[in-house]
Amino acid sequence: MRRDLPMMLIRVIVGLVFVTEGILKFAYPDELGAGRFANIGLPFPGLLGPLVGGIEVAGGAALLLNFYAGDAALLLLAVIGTALITTKLPVLFGRPIGPFALMKAPHHGVIGFIHEARTDLCMLFGTVAVLIDSGLRLGHRRRWYESSMER
């Protein structure tokens, strides 16, 4: 139990943040869901807002419950990776990148990027830790014709 405590704490905070952010996308769609996605420049914001919110709620709950946590972490990595690319990379370069607008930030460049992306980076590395710890389970299940001794 004591040996697993650090990973349990990472699962709890990462899962809780994803669940909360997912709920907020439904509670405040104009500010944090579809409206925000439209301002960023993502295509189909009306579809992506609820989809991403649902993935965050379900994936975060899976991390909290340690139920297919590695598989959920893989989906959540796609979400957090997209968030970093679409909202934080323009801060790093100090200009819009393709359709992704430059958000208002007090500073641009490396320091501005690290400041603006600090939570996203923590979530990225926490999610990677969960993926490494849990592994992927889908597609690796024992078949009905395999005995437990064969694996």
Image (spheres, helix red, strand yellow):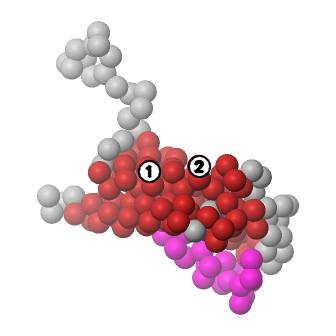
Q: Residue at x 25, y 17 (%)?
A: 150
In the rendered structure, find residue 4 and report the number of the disc placed on it: none
Mark 2: few, some, or many residues within 10 Å (few <14, many ≥20)?
A: some
Residue 116 seen in this snapshot: yes
Magenta highlight range: 103-128
Name the spot of residue 151 as percent of width and height, x first.
Answer: 27, 22
Q: CA distance from mark 1 to mark 2?
A: 12 Å
- Residue type, mark 1 in image: Gly
Could you tell me if the residues under marks 1 and 2 are in contact, i.e. CB atoms within 8 Å?
no
- What secondary structure do most residues of the magenta stretch adopt? helix
* Circle 1 residue: 59
Name the spot of residue 84 as percent of width and height, x first.
Answer: 64, 64
Q: Residue at x 53, y 66 (%)?
A: 27
Q: Height in image: 4 above or below 112?
A: above
Q: Height in image: 2 above or below 90?
A: above
* Circle 2 residue: 51
